[in-house]
Image (cartoon, rainbow, N blue to C red):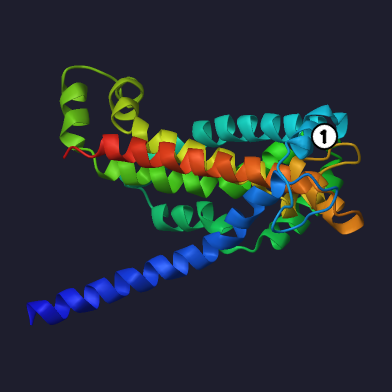
Amino acid sequence: MEQATSGWRRTVNLLAIVFIAFLLLPSLIVVPMSFGNSDQIIFPPKGFSVRMFEKYFSDSGWIAATLLSLRVAIWTTVLSVCLGVPAAYALVRGRFPGRRVLALFLLTPIMVPSVVLALAFYVFYFRIDLTQGELRLVLAHCVATLPFIIVTAAAGIQGTDPNIERAAMVMGAGRLYVFRTVTVPLVMPSIIAGALFTFLISFDEIIISLFVARAGDTTLPVKMFSSLVFEVSPVLAAISTMLTFLSAAICIVIALVQKGEDPK
């Protein structure tokens, strides 16, 4: 019986590895294409060159779009953490009427399609006459990414012993002081993981950015999409490679942070 279970487990693991490899294969193909020496996207590349990366770094349009995406992602992460961590603490530790309804409301952006959120923000910004481009992007991205911070922070708070907080309050500390000096340090790995997820999601967001960005405020994903529609530039392969390594690096950091959180 144990041998049959072990064989079935190995088969499932093998199928999972094959499936994951199939999903990752397109991303891995982009990497060698980005080092080709042709002015077109060709696979397999006929030579080795870093010319595509040089074109990217020498093009002011690509650099401006990248810097805008970085600024928006950083501000989105900061705002989402400042709002999401207290919200997660209230949902986990709080005992008040409507807590489940509030939790469902805050997690709604995960369940609503991005195009619906994008259209809603487009109409809302038009109604309130919000014209500041980066602010439009940051607020929209914050709403879309806030659930990820809440979920990760709530998981960390649930894993901490509430008696530690009670002991601090018994010694005379206020609830806000306990949250700032006891709870937050204990769940810092979860907060960091959620912040990294938020940064990555905001940096790669395209649907919402297409709807809410004003003329001249072109993020990197939007510029890549426009370049793909109007001209298939070989620079896209170089940018895709850098984004792939950025995503991989963030995932590795998240894994290390979560591993460090494990008491075992």
In the figure, 6 relative to 231: above or below?
below
Q: Residue furthest left?
A: 1
Indicate whether 90 appears above or below 122. above
- Give the camera-side residue of 194 and 154: 194
- The one nearer the camera, 18 or 259, is 18
Q: Locate residue 186, reporting x and y percent.
A: 28, 30
Q: Is 39 on the left-hand or right-hand side of 220?
A: right
The quarter of the displayed image where residue 253 is located: top left
Question: In screen coordinates, is 211 left or right of 261?
Answer: right
Number of callouts: 1
Q: Is residue 84 visible?
A: no
Q: Which residue is mark 1?
A: 55
Query: The C terminus is located in which quarter?
Result: top left
Where residue 135 sits: x, y (%)?
75, 33
Residue 216 percent coordinates (x, y): 90, 37
The answer, for residue 108, to whether it is visible in the render is: yes
| Residue 74 place in picture, x, y as percent | 62, 30
Q: Quadrant of the N terminus?
A: bottom left
Mark 1 is surrounded, within 10 Å at the Cα level, by few (under 14), some (14 to 19) or many (20 or more) other residues, namely some
Q: Choose between 77 and 232: the one closer to the eye.
A: 232
Q: Which residue is rendered at x = 33% and y = 20% of the image?
A: 177
- In the rendered structure, the answer to whether residue 209 lies left or right of residue 217 reads left
| 178 vs 53: above or below | above
Q: Residue at x 8, y 77 (%)?
A: 2
Give the residue at x 55% y 43%: 247
Residue visible at 86% across and 33% down?
A: 61
Furthest-top residue in this view: 172
Q: Secondary structure at mark 1?
A: helix
Residue 120's quadrant in the figure?
A: bottom right
Name the amino acid type tagged 1. Lys
